[in-house]
Image (tube, rainbow, N blue to C red):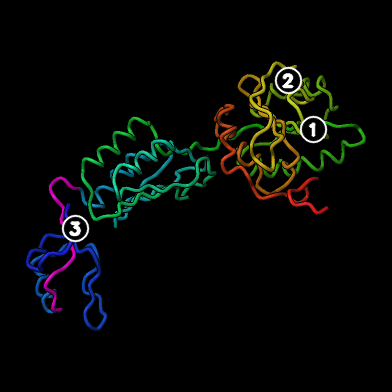
Amino acid sequence: MKFGEVPVEEAVGAILAHKLYDNAGKLIFNKGHLIGEADLESLRLQGLERVTVTQLSAADLHEDAAAERIGAAVAGAHVSMRAPGVGRANLTAAQRGVFHVDVPRLEWINNIYDGITIATLRQYSLVDAGDMVALVKVVPFGVPAARVVDVERIAEASGAVLRVRPLQRKRVALIVSGTDATRSRLMKSFQEPVRKRIEGWGSELLAPTFTAHSAASIAAAIKAQAAKADLILVAGISAIIDREDVVPSALEMAGGSITLHGVPVDPGTLLMMGYLGDAPVVGAPGCIKSPKTNVIDWILPRLLSGERLTRANLVSMGHGGLLKDIAERPMPRSMTD
């Protein structure tokens, strides 16, 4: 591929690099126009002796063909691709779900050749069907075909550079722990915010359970809910301060395991994540009561898509994990003496 000025007589078959206007400011040819023999007279009438063009070789692919092939290569499960021209391929979510990106391979592809670019939403974004999740843009008017083949091979090795995990309809249990005196207040404060979130994500909140705030009582409730729920939330009168606190102890007493206590997302660092068999068990922080985005909004959609979260998944949330503060919590970030 060659780029630069050439005499007008040598421009036939080349691609015009910039828009051309006549002396009155009227557009003659748009950039990207393929110059033909019939165009030479128009160029001469403007007094032009040289024009800036791109000349593709037999080893090059036109921007539109390149973008379409790259888009098709990186679009994985539940990602649709459309190539409208001008070196673009638009990738959209085919279903509502959680957007996944093979970040190392995305960066590898973006480093292959100047002008081959893929811009995406952030990893694990919750997307609706039809939302744009990525844009392929080939910047020059053509790129070497071999570099497009490189992209295709990287994408093939990845299995799916970009994909969407659809949200599934799950049965979600809510266990609220406290004292008899606090039962009404706690049930009222937790039930409605949790219901709105769960139903908003297309799942079902089962009838909430109230139990005493003790390891034995919560363990019994977890076992009972595990027989009918796909996901269990435990919230209560007291935050989880330590891995040996009441809720983590209850999960282990029920036969489950703790994946992590203390997720690097604020609001929500006190969250506990664990499993009882295949069922996720989340010890929810108090911010689950707030409608503002917090750690719950980062974790539950992934669980509702069927993903099993590991310790590594959770600790990686620290990058970007400082969310907007919730003023109504007991100790907001900004406090006056």
Q: Residue at x 76, y 31 (%)?
A: 240
Q: Which mark is residue 176?
A: 1
Mark 1 burial class by Cα count in 10 Å: few <14, some 14-19, many 20+:
many
Q: Which mark is residue 3?
A: 3
Mark 2 secondary-structure assignment? helix
Q: Amino acid at mark 2?
A: Lys
As for residue 54 lying within the magenta part, the answer is yes
- Closer-to-camera residue (104/249): 104
Q: Amino acid at mark 3?
A: Phe
Marks 3/2: CA–CA distance: 69 Å
| Residue 118 drawn above or below residue 7 | above
Q: Is residue 179 left or right of residue 148?
A: right
List x then y, in percent, for residue 234: 74, 31
Q: What range is drawn magenta here? A: 46-60
List x then y, in percent, for residue 239: 78, 34
Tell me, yes or no, whether the two marked residues, 3 and 2, touch with CB atoms within 8 Å.
no
Q: Which mark is residue 223?
A: 2
Q: Amino acid at mark 1?
A: Val
Q: Which mark is residue 62?
A: none
Q: Nearer the viewer, mark 1 or mark 3?
A: 3
| Residue 89 can be seen in this image | yes
Q: Nearer the viewer, mark 3 or mark 2?
A: 3
